[in-house]
Every structure is written in structure tokens, then in C-alpha cells.
Image (tube, grey):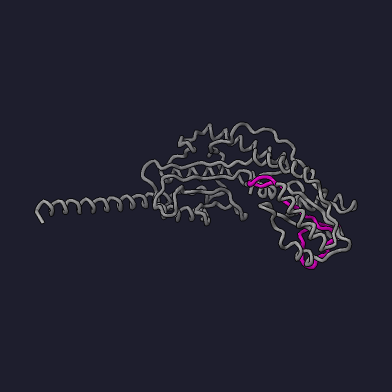
């Protein structure tokens, strides 16, 4: 081997070692940046629920256009009463208990029994009817006293109410799904000696399409991003710090900020695959119709975004990577309040069981 070859090998080895050292140094800096950002010296806005968030103005790409007045959501499904004596008190029980059969969003079909039927017998018959296509099916029963509730072992029921959800984010109930629902329901009715009151398919399809229009017009998801101003952030250290802030990691890799009641307030994505070690962009996402106004999901998400941007030396930006101004956030905040008012007017308040079922 000549002196030239030896020299070239030495130079090449030095360069390789230099690159490795540089990469390790970059990883170390990224890790220290995150560690310093989430050190004990920083005040965490999410750890202090009493901290006002009004001054943190709201964010987001925007609810496209002005919020329009909401047309009345159709309420023309089969009446949920087995007899005139219980007609007035049953809706109150349904509303207060938030039972799984809801005549505003379900096609509800009553099945009257010739004689009271035990709950265990009903449960055995309906066990296999949980979905038609992708639409969930639920049942409730009415006792001799007129009270309605979920079917329970040991109970006795004079009427069964079957409800198939008319709309979800996958689309409205279609003719095939409805036909399957009716076919299976007739078989259940025969086995229980019940008399089903089947509504006209065309009317049900019209109702489903009208409700689907409402869902399509109010399916709003608002996001805000934090972009790194310099070097990217070390992912492992960042994820550990975010979990300490209160985020829960989901199986799909996203992190969720719990709402304190078993639900999700908003989510966070690192925008990279699980195999990556660094990220330079975080995205917070609010599913607007699924979060109750009282939880102020928009304000909490804005507060979290600003806190992360400050700690990580990042910038709060929109999906076009443009910084989000205070004026823009204020405008979006007003649109969110109008959005909530429109949903409440349609009797589908954001965050309610109705809303969570429709926007699922």
C-alpha cells in the first residue's frame, strides 16, 4: 500500500469519525434543548387549570366562511310511545338519562309485546344485532310503569324500541342497511311475539340525508402547529416530557390531552413515523363538535401551543407555515362560539352524546 493510499484512508477515517461526532453532538443538543425546555424552572400552563386562557387568544386555520343559521334537524321518526298513558313522561326519561336510542338521530322502531317479556330473553334475541353495515343499532325497553331504560336481566318489558343510527362520518343510512335492519328486526319480533311498527323507507332515507347535510356542514376540526425555529427536537425526550405534561399516548402514535371525564380535549401529532428520532413540527388538533363549550377546548389548545412554542423556541403557525396573528385567533374564537350556538340551536350541543355519536 502506497503512502498516498494510507493518507487517503486516514483522511477518510477522520471524516467519518467527524461526521459521527457531529451527528451525536446534534442529537445531544436536541435532547438538551427539550430537557431544558421542560425543566422545573418553567411554569406549565396546563398544570394550573385556574390560569385564565382568555388572553392566550384562540388559533387555527379557520372555520371556512361565516357560520350559517342551522336548519331545523328533522324529527320525524317513529314515535317512541307504546300507549297514550306513557306518551308525556317517556321523552323526559330519555333526555335525562341520555339513553342509547335517540329519536333525533336514530330511526326508531317500536315493537309492542302481547305480554311482558323478560329482559334475559330479549337480550338473547338482540345479541347479534349491533350493526347494520357501519351503522350502530341500539335497544331500550319500556316497563309496565312506562319507564324506559336499557334492557337488563331480571327486568320485564311491555315494549322494545330498536334504533339504528341514521348518520355518522361515514355517511347516511342507505337502503341496503335499512333493509338489513328491518329483516333482522322482523325475525326478532317473530321470536318475541312482538308487533313492529315499520316506517316507510323513503321517508327514512330523506331524514337520513337531511341529517347528513347537518353533519357535513358542522364537521369541523381545527389545528394549530408549532414549528421549530432552529434545530429539530429529540423525539424520545420530547414524548416523555409531553406525557409528564398530561398527554396520553394512543396506539396510533398520537398523543391525547384528556378532558378529565374519560374523553379527549385535543390531540397532538409529531408528524413523523415511529422510526424517526427527531421532529421539527408538532400539530395540535381539536375535534370541535365533540368537545363541550364549557371545556373551552379551543382556549386550552391555544394555551398549550403557546406554552410549547415558548419552551421549545418554536413559532405557532398555520397549515401554510405562516405565523398566526392575534387578530386571526380572535376572529376564529368568535367563529367557534357561533359554531357552538348553531349546534345548540339544532338540539345537538357540541360534546353531547348526540354529537359524539354523529361525529364518530
Residue lying farthest right? 85
**Residue at x 21%, y 50% (from the top left corner):** 15
Q: Position of residue 86 (x, y in %)?
A: 87, 53
Q: Position of residue 311 (x, y in %)?
A: 43, 46
The front one of 101 and 50 is 101
The front one of 321 and 118 is 118
- Classify residue 229 by image quadrant: top left
Q: Any magenta on residue 170?
A: yes
**Residue at x 55%, y 38% (from the top left corner):** 58
The front one of 128 and 218 is 128
Q: Quadrant of the N terminus?
A: bottom left
In this rendering, position of residue 221 left or right of residue 21: right
In this rendering, position of residue 58 left or right of residue 114: left
Q: Position of residue 303 (x, y in %)?
A: 52, 43
Q: Position of residue 358 (x, y in %)?
A: 67, 47
The front one of 84 and 311 is 84
**Residue at x 72%, y 43% (from the top left corner):** 208
Q: Which residues are magenta?
A: 146-173
Residue lying farthest left? 3
**Residue at x 78%, y 52% (from the top left corner):** 94
Q: Any magenta on residue 50?
A: no
Amino acid at each position: 500500500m502506497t503512502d498516498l493510499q494510507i493518507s487517503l484512508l486516514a483522511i477518510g477515517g477522520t471524516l467519518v469519525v467527524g461526521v459521527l461526532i457531529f451527528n451525536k453532538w446534534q442529537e445531544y443538543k436536541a435532547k438538551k434543548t427539550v430537557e431544558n425546555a421542560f425543566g422545573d424552572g418553567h411554569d406549565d400552563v396546563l398544570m394550573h387549570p385556574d390560569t385564565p386562557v382568555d388572553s392566550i387568544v384562540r388559533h387555527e386555520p379557520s372555520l371556512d366562511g361565516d357560520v350559517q343559521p342551522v336548519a331545523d334537524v328533522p324529527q320525524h321518526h317513529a314515535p317512541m310511545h307504546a300507549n297514550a298513558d306513557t306518551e308525556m313522561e317517556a321523552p323526559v326519561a330519555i333526555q335525562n338519562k341520555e339513553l342509547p336510542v335517540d329519536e333525533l338521530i336514530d330511526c326508531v322502531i317500536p315493537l309492542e309485546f302481547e305480554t311482558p317479556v323478560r329482559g334475559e330473553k330479549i337480550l338473547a334475541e338482540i345479541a347479534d344485532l349491533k350493526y347494520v353495515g357501519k351503522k350502530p343499532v341500539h335497544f331500550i325497553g319500556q316497563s309496565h310503569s312506562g319507564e324506559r331504560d336499557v334492557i337488563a336481566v331480571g327486568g320485564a318489558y311491555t315494549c322494545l324500541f330498536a334504533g339504528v343510527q341514521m348518520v355518522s362520518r361515514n355517511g347516511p343510512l342507505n337502503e341496503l342497511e335499512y333493509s338489513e335492519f328491518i329483516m333482522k328486526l322482523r325475525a326478532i319480533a317473530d321470536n318475541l311475539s312482538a308487533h313492529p311498527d315499520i316506517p316507510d323507507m323513503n321517508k327514512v332515507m330523506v331524514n337520513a340525508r337531511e341529517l347528513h347535510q347537518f353533519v357535513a356542514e358542522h364537521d369541523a376540526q381545527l389545528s394549530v402547529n408549532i414549528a421549530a425555529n432552529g434545530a429539530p427536537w429529540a423525539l424520545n425526550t420530547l414524548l416523555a416530557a409531553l406525557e409528564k405534561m398530561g398527554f396520553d399516548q394512543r396506539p396510533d402514535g398520537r398523543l391525547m390531552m384528556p378532558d378529565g371525564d374519560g374523553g379527549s380535549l385535543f390531540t397532538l401529532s409529531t408528524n413523523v413515523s415511529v422510526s424517526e428520532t427527531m421532529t421539527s413540527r408538532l400539530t395540535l388538533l381539536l375535534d370541535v363538535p365533540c368537545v363541550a363549550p364549557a371545556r373551552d377546548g379551543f382556549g386550552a389548545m391555544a394555551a398549550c401551543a403557546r406554552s410549547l412554542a415558548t419552551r421549545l423556541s418554536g413559532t405557532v403557525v398555520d397549515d401554510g407555515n405562516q405565523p398566526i396573528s392575534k387578530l386571526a385567533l380572535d376572529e376564529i374564537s368568535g367563529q367557534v362560539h357561533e359554531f357552538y350556538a348553531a349546534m345548540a340551536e339544532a338540539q345537538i350541543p357540541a360534546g353531547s352524546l348526540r354529537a359524539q355519536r354523529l361525529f364518530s
